[in-house]
Image (spheres, grey):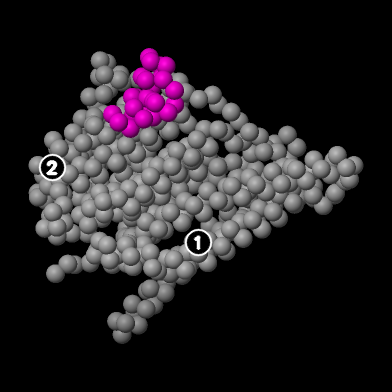
Amino acid sequence: MRTAIRYVLKTLVWGMIAGCVGGLLYGLILLIRDNPVYFIQQVLDGLKLGFVFALIALGYTLVYGIVKLINFAHGDVFMVGAFTSFYAITRYHWGFVPAILLAMVVCTFLNVVIERVAYKPLRNAPRISALITAIGVSFFLEYFTALNFVFGPNYITYKRPIELIVWNLREFTNVWLILSVLFIAIMTGAAFLLRRRRAKSLAIHIAEEVAVPSSQASGGSTVVAVVVWAGLVAATVGAAYLVDMALASWLQSSGVTWGFRRNLILLPEGGGILLTNITVVIMGVTLLLLFLLQYVVGSTKIGKAMRTAAYDKSTAQLMGINVDSIISFTFAIAAAFAGGAGVLYAIAYPQILTFMGIMPGLKAFVAAVLGGIGSIPGAFIGALLMGQLDMLTVAYVPYGSRLRDGIAFIILIIVFLVRPTGIMGEPEREKV
């Protein structure tokens, strides 16, 4: 009887989930048909915000993976990075690259000091003690930096270190669409065949190196595959556009008209999808840092030590690994990512405030939980989803600008109720 009731309840829950997903997909189709330009524009803006969330969420998931701590001061380290670059740009006229490097260095130093002073003495204390301490450090950073002799309590207009350039994509043609789909299909098929041939041996090899289950070891290769696939999709769409433009130029010079090429015009007269160089810079910097993180975690001795410490600290110490140094190094990487995210966020939305890290930090935490806290690829995927959710809420939900923050936390509650481990997380195994 109990088994039958449980089966019925489980069927009802999954039916409700399927209904919600179906409703969302139907609504999405209606939105695209109603105004495709506006929808695609919001998706692009959501990607821009999602890539910033990804850098912050990776910091959360790295620290949690090593010490099982939710570092709620992480968003305020993000804020310090934005202000550091602001003063470097306005007072010393530094460019974008030195400013973001300085912000990453300053945030790294700050986070290591926080870890040594506030968290290290509580290493063996109950988790709630470290969590309350993290909240206290967050409040201290917010209110201390709001003093007039530090950063000040008012909004400050951020001077962008790079000139804003806007590209207006006016039309999509049949040839561009066909070439894009063809190129992406060929690239995806080739990547699938290569990955199918190498994935199993790669996971087993990594698992043997660090003595962890192969299911846990495959996460690094997953994030590389996701990032490479996303980059190649963008490259293939751009290549298709260039081929289309070259073909159109050749036809025009030859005096040939080809009506089929212009049969699919999605954009209305005078409208267009706006793509800025800031969006490209944010995506490029984020992908570069993701590749760097993957290299450090997957291909260096200190990365191997990080994975070993994350799996079992006691065994790592017996193997001669300095766990305290590994934890400090993890905090340093997380802070560098947060500092870079602060600069990118300030360039995209050029107003900064000492309390600016609260909501991006909390939303990045929700993204990390959505993707699977402790999972690097999960944090990346969850951040992209959170960026889309944020922008589409503002664009299409009534009073969306007021509800955007609340909806993010509703997603957090739903994740905890339906799948507490997140999209790519795994239940913790008891070690005996």
Pinpoint residue 42: horizontal percent, then vertical percent. 56, 42
Asked whether 38 or 255 is in front, the reply is 255
Q: Secondary structure at mark 1?
A: helix
| Magenta stretch in the rendered image | 81-106
Q: Residue at x 38, y 68 (%)?
A: 201
Q: Earlier in the sequence, mark 1 or mark 2?
A: 1
Q: CA distance from mark 1 to mark 2?
A: 44 Å
- The image quarter in which residue 238 lies: top right
Decide: few, some or many residues near mark 1? Use Cα within 10 Å; few <14, some 14-19, many ≥20. Answer: few
Residue 409 shows up from this direction:
no
Residue that mark 1 sits on: 21
Asked whether 385 or 413 is in front, the reply is 385
Relative to 201, say whether 1 is above or below.
below
Decide: few, some or many residues near mark 2? Use Cα within 10 Å; few <14, some 14-19, many ≥20. Answer: some
In screen coordinates, is 247 left or right of 102? Answer: right
In screen coordinates, is 288 left or right of 250? Answer: left
Pinpoint residue 170: horizontal percent, then vertical percent. 70, 38
Q: Residue at x 36, y 19 (%)?
A: 87
Q: Nearer the viewer, mark 1 or mark 2?
A: 2
Amino acid of disc 2: Lys
Q: Secondary structure at mark 2?
A: helix
Mark number for residue 120?
2
Asked whether 253 or 152 is in front, the reply is 253
**Please, what is the dominant secondary structure of the magenta stretch?**
helix
Q: Quadrant of the C terminus?
A: bottom left
Pinpoint residue 226: horizontal percent, then vertical percent. 47, 54
Q: Residue furthest right?
A: 255
Does the magenta segment cover residue 98?
yes
Mark number for residue 88?
none
Does the magenta segment cover residue 96?
yes
